[in-house]
Image: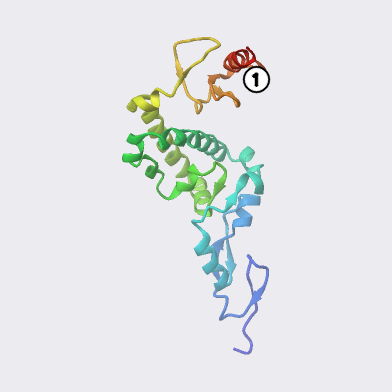
Amino acid sequence: GEHSEARLCDYSGQFFCEDCHWNDQVIIPARVIHNWDFSLYKVSRQTKQFLDLMIKKPLLDLEQLNPALFKFVGELREIKRLREEILIMKKYFMSCRMALESKLLLHLQDHQHFVDNSNVYSLQDILEVENGSMLPFVTRVHSLFLTHIKSDCELCRAKGFVCETCKVNEIIFAFDPHAVQCAKCRTVFHKLCFKKDSCPKCQRIRKRTSK
């Protein structure tokens, strides 16, 4: 009507008439990323439809947008570590018939982007971090993948290493928190045993090639 109030859309910062702004309330991605603010704000119809459409799309690189979040949000830090390890585990599955046949990666459900990189999230992912359901989910999937590689599958287990420095009889993998992989030859060592410029395998390779 003639006297309809102008309504502010929190997302765009623009004003709309009552026909285009129905006082729908949504969570604003920028407020979540920059202030960890999950309050509801009023937006226009157009914005509401757009955000509904985008909620499950993995578009938010938190590492780039606000790396400080990982300092302040403990769960996020833990999820990041688990995702980094899952990313390494994926390489084992790509060459494992048993993992491919059992469609192991499908346990990630709506979070298939977790095996593409470790720092991109959808708004839905972040809501699940906030409501407490994401960490148990990722922990469960991580331990399922771990069990496959370390105990269920001989093929994957055979890709483990014994640390060449201390030669302790323990099979270690690149995704183990206490292990590290040589960037050049990809051999895995205990973090405490590894010195970057004196990898025993690289030294052997150098000796062989210099003969």
In the image, residue 182 above or below residue 85:
above
Residue at 38%, 43% in the rendered image: 107
Looking at the image, residue 195 sits to the left or right of residue 139; the answer is right
Furthest residue in direction bottom, as rendered: 2
- Measured as percent of width and height from the top left, residue 24 is found at 53, 69
Looking at the image, residue 116 sits to the left or right of residue 34; the answer is left
Q: Amino acid at mark 1?
A: Lys
**Disc 1 crowd, CA 10 A, few/some/many (<14, 14-19, 20+):** few
Quadrant housing the C terminus: top right
Query: Which residue is more in the foreground, 46 or 98?
Result: 98
- Measured as percent of width and height from the top left, residue 62 is found at 61, 47
Query: Which residue is more in the foreground, 208 or 34?
Result: 208
- Measured as percent of width and height from the top left, residue 209 is found at 61, 17
Residue at 66%, 75% in the rendered image: 15
In the image, residue 20 above or below residue 165:
below
In the image, residue 17 above or below residue 177:
below
Q: Quadrant of residue 43?
A: bottom right
Residue at 34%, 42% in the rendered image: 103
Furthest residue in direction front, as rendered: 211
> How did the renderer colour the structure?
rainbow
Query: Which residue is more in the foreground, 187 or 20?
Result: 187
Quadrant housing the N terminus: bottom right
| Residue bearing the label numbered 1 | 196
The kind of secondary structure element at disc 1 is: helix
Q: Quadrant of residue 4?
A: bottom right
- Measured as percent of width and height from the top left, residue 108 is found at 41, 44
Residue at 54%, 34% in the rendered image: 81
